[in-house]
Image (spheres, rainbow, N blue to C red):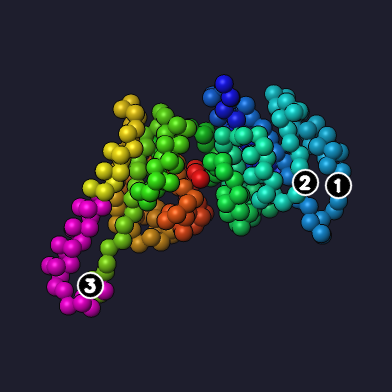
Amino acid sequence: MKKFTTLVAIDFSKSSYVVLEKALDFTNKRDGELHVVHVVESSFFSKKEDIDAVHERRYTELSKNYSEIKKENFHCVSGKIKVEVANSAKLLDADLIIMGNSGETHFLNEFIMGSHTKEIIKNAQTPILVMKDEHELEYKNILVLTDLSDDSAAAIKKVANFFPNSKITLLNLFYLPSDDKFGLFGFEEDDLEKYQARIKDESQKNIDAFLKSLSMPNELDISASAIVSSLNPKKFKEEASDISYDMLSIHATQNVSFFAFDILEQSDVDVFVVK
């Protein structure tokens, strides 16, 4: 039986060691195997380095504090970070990529919250956990954004498979027409209130039916909610303030994708991105 396999991308900054330590603990608790990848950026302007020499030097450095990481599980590759992380995950048949959120260098700062992250998410077929804090990678309450699509259903089942002991709340966002827009068509305030109430009721019924259609295990603690949203990522935290969660999960396909990366950037809890 294949072992649970985690891939961690590091740049040897202080913050990337934090990510590595948390990933080791996370993987060990699942009796899995951890692989580490270090990407040496190659471009027309970058200094050419002997990749074997870099591999040897970096592994010597890594093994001083992490002797449990086997040499064959440390991968030093040359290329574009956004490509090589995804490629490494594919070659290793990794179940999960874990990345950090901040650091002293561009790798864990500009790259994680910039265009490279988007490219990795687009390229990788592997779920990605982006660490936003230094806490343990164990989650009591997971909030999963859903657009009620088949892709979302598959993503939710992956979340449940990864975190079977967590409480999972499915959340569908819906938009209500404003008073001003509704008034342009000559409707009265009472008509607007009835219309909005009907949308709210239908939205909750839709997500309840969606949850039922998933046929999740009875022992799983899972519920579903539909809330009014402006669909503005900067306002999402306030709009979902009544829901308790220590991880946010998004799927990078179809309707959620148009603001998924903005949600990732704005979130102050860890984000689990599922393809």
At 35% from the left and 62% from the top, the residue drawn is 230
Out of 73 and 62, give the one closest to the viewer.
73
Picture quarter with the N terminus? top right
Q: Give the range drawn in magenta.
A: 181-204
Residue type at tag 1: Glu
Residue 215 appears anywhere in the view: yes
Mark 1 / mark 3, whichever is N-terminal:
1
Query: Pointer 3: what residue?
Result: 182
Query: Pointer 2: what residue?
Result: 78
At 74% from the left and 36% from the top, the residue drawn is 75
Vertical placement of residue 251 versus 94, above or below: below
Vertical placement of residue 200 versus 128, above or below: below
Crowd band around label 1 with a 10 angstrom C-alpha radius: few (<14), some (14–19), many (20+) = few
Query: Pointer 1: what residue?
Result: 49
Vertical placement of residue 159 versus 265, above or below: above
Q: Where is residue 74 in the image (x, y as percent from the top left)?
A: 73, 33
Query: Distance between the Cα atoms at labels 1 and 3?
Result: 63 Å
Query: Distance between the Cα atoms at labels 2 and 1?
Result: 9 Å
Q: Residue 96 carries which label?
A: none
Q: Where is residue 61 in the image (x, y as percent from the top left)?
A: 78, 33
Q: Characterize the magenta stretch by its predominant secondary structure.
A: helix
Crowd band around label 2 with a 10 angstrom C-alpha radius: few (<14), some (14–19), many (20+) = some
Q: Tag 1, which secondary structure?
A: loop
Vertical placement of residue 264 versus 24, above or below: below
At 64% from the left and 30% from the top, the residue drawn is 34
